[in-house]
Amino acid sequence: MKGICILGATGSIGVSTLDVVARHADLYKVVALTANNNIDLLYQQCLEHNPEFVVVVDEGKAQAFKEKLKDSPIFDIEVLSGAKALEYVATLDKVDSVMAAIVGAAGLLPTLAAAKAGKAVLLANKEALVMSGDIFMQTVARSGAQLLPIDSEHNAIFQCMPAAYKPGMHAKQARRILLTASGGPFRQMPIEQMADVTPDQAVAHPNWDMGRKISVDSATMMNKGLEMIEACLLFDMKPEQIQVVIHPQSVIHSMVDYVDGTVLAQMGNPDMRIPIAYALAWPERFDSGAEPLNIFNVRRMDFEEPNLDRFPCLRLAYQAIRAGGIMPTVLNAANEIAVEAFLNEIVRFTDIPVIIQRCMESFDVKQANTLEIILAVDEQARMISKQIIAELKS
């Protein structure tokens, strides 16, 4: 049996991962679960999966979780707290695979620690790769870690790559990646109305069940921008080789265009258990629990180019990766702060790209060749973004 650690167990990816793992309890043992503060769901997960370790990042919530365990049948679980504990459980000898599903920059250090330790890293945290770029990929190459993408798009691309392909390699036969996007809930909304979009509207994704931050990113198409940067790194492609394609039905999850004119596409219902199961079973396959795709119910598939006036965040992502160096880190940090402010109803939906662009304009491009530089730039970009938000409010 393989031991698995799930970083971000109470989020949508973590919940789906546990669903798949439960279907194959003869193959996987849950060693560690982590959460930020949702201790009620975490407790139910522990009752079902009985991990050896639990990390609750918030120390007060960790203490409350310990109290919940005292009179329970799972009282012997070791409960840890704090960000450092995430790195500890991600590198345990008993852990073979790490599901990296913590949203945002908070997932960088434990995901990087898992890669350094040579684990099979199931990467659902795109921000970790966007922030650390070449450092992350070099760490994977040096340690011999197995990197398996979980985002439905990158997992689809991985499945469409040549036999024996490994992320980080350049596939000479592949000339272009067609990265699909649903277009989110505002694909057809008049642009002049988008300033009045509410958080509840922005998180109501038409096809996928995701967390609030990722849902807003999908609505602005920053999610696709981050995925484009991630695809450049995972598949050793230039930005101009990544074509974003809006496909509202979310049946094709991405495509690879080959030099002979062949285009391979991976299709399936919009269910994250499919890429999760593929990564867990790789290089084999097993049941994910997802409904089989009924192609007759699909009826039609539409494709269109994204409108960058409607989705300026996508344009900013292309600017960041072309500039290189620290700029993807700045982009990600500014976006996280801007989205948080929007969800808290401090700024408007259309302020999100304004905040990101002004923050990016505050930095000169320089190399991001150490983790210390990346973390310092991340912190600085967050401070500048908060100052921009304060100016917008005044």
Image: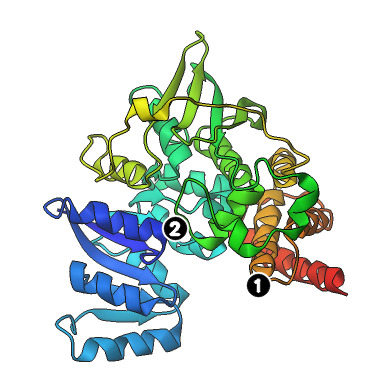
Q: Is residue 79 found left or right of 364 in the rendered image?
A: left
Q: Is residue 350 found left or right of 36 in the rendered image?
A: right
* Helix, strand or loop status at disc 2: helix
Q: Residue at x 63, y 30 (%)?
A: 238
Query: x, y percentage for residue 356?
Result: 75, 56
Answer yes or no: is residue 97 visible: yes
Amino acid identity at mark 2: Thr
Residue on which disc 1 sits: 344
Query: x, y percentage for residue 377?
Result: 70, 62
Residue on which disc 2 sits: 111
Q: Quadrant of residue 49?
A: bottom left
Above or below: residue 80 compared with residue 389: below
Query: x, y percentage for residue 241?
Result: 62, 26
Above or below: residue 118 compared with residue 94: above
In the rendered structure, are the residues bearing label 1 and label 2 in contact, judged by CB atoms less than 8 Å apart?
no
Q: Quadrant of residue 320?
A: top right
* Helix, strand or loop status at disc 1: loop
Q: Residues within 10 Å of mark 1 (few under 14, many from 20)?
A: few
Amino acid identity at mark 1: Asn
Above or below: residue 57 compared with residue 138: below
Query: x, y percentage for residue 252?
Result: 45, 30
Answer yes or no: is residue 172 visible: no
Q: Residue at x 41, y 29 (%)?
A: 298
Quadrant where the C terminus sits is bottom right
Q: Residue at x 46, y 62 (%)?
A: 102
